[in-house]
Image (cartoon, rainbow, N blue to C red):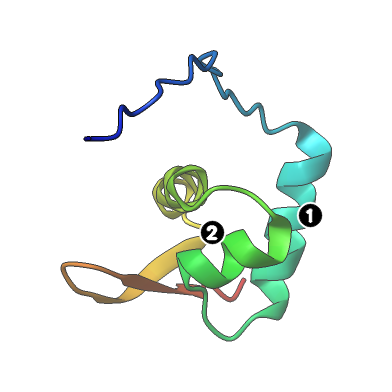
Amino acid sequence: MPYKKRRVEREKVVRGILINDEDMARIESIISKSKFIIPTALANQLGIRVSIIKDILEDLEKRGKIKVYDKSRRIQIYVPVKQ
């Protein structure tokens, strides 16, 4: 007799993250102290999803605070720009 799989109805959770100025200042201070930045390591350190960190790092690169050191299909390594 085959088992019937029970479907559990789950509510869909919409996750939105807003980065406020305090969090952005914290990210920038961590970046300025680092020799290099890898998105996964930064995400683990801050407890933020990797996709959000990647967007933040791209924005910081456009503003000239960091630059891409090495880029591959899966990972990008950034270095802070010395001012």
Q: Residue at x 58, y 76 (%)?
A: 82
Quarter that holds the C terminus = bottom right
Foreground of the two, 3 or 70: 3
Label 2: element kind: loop
Q: Are marks 2 and 1 in contact (CB under 8 Å)?
A: no
Q: Which of the two labelled residues, at mark 2 and mark 1, occupies the earlier sequence position?
A: 1
- Label of residue 74 in the image: none
- Label of residue 26 in the image: 1
Q: Residue at x 54, y 48 (%)?
A: 49
Foreground of the two, 40 or 30: 40
At label 2, counting other C-alpha atoms closer than 10 Å, the crowd grade (few under 14, some 14-19, many 20 or more) is some
Q: Residue at x 66, y 26 (%)?
A: 18
**Residue 3 position within the rendered picture, expressed as x and y whole percent measured from the top left:** 29, 34
The residue type indicated by label 2 comes to Lys
Label 1: element kind: helix
Q: In the rendered image, which residue does mark 2 sit on?
A: 65
* In the displayed structure image, the side of residue 21 where residue 17 appears, left or right: left
Residue extending farthest to the right is 22
* In the displayed structure image, the side of residue 15 where residue 20 appears, left or right: right
**Residue 20 position within the rendered picture, expressed as x and y whole percent measured from the top left:** 75, 31
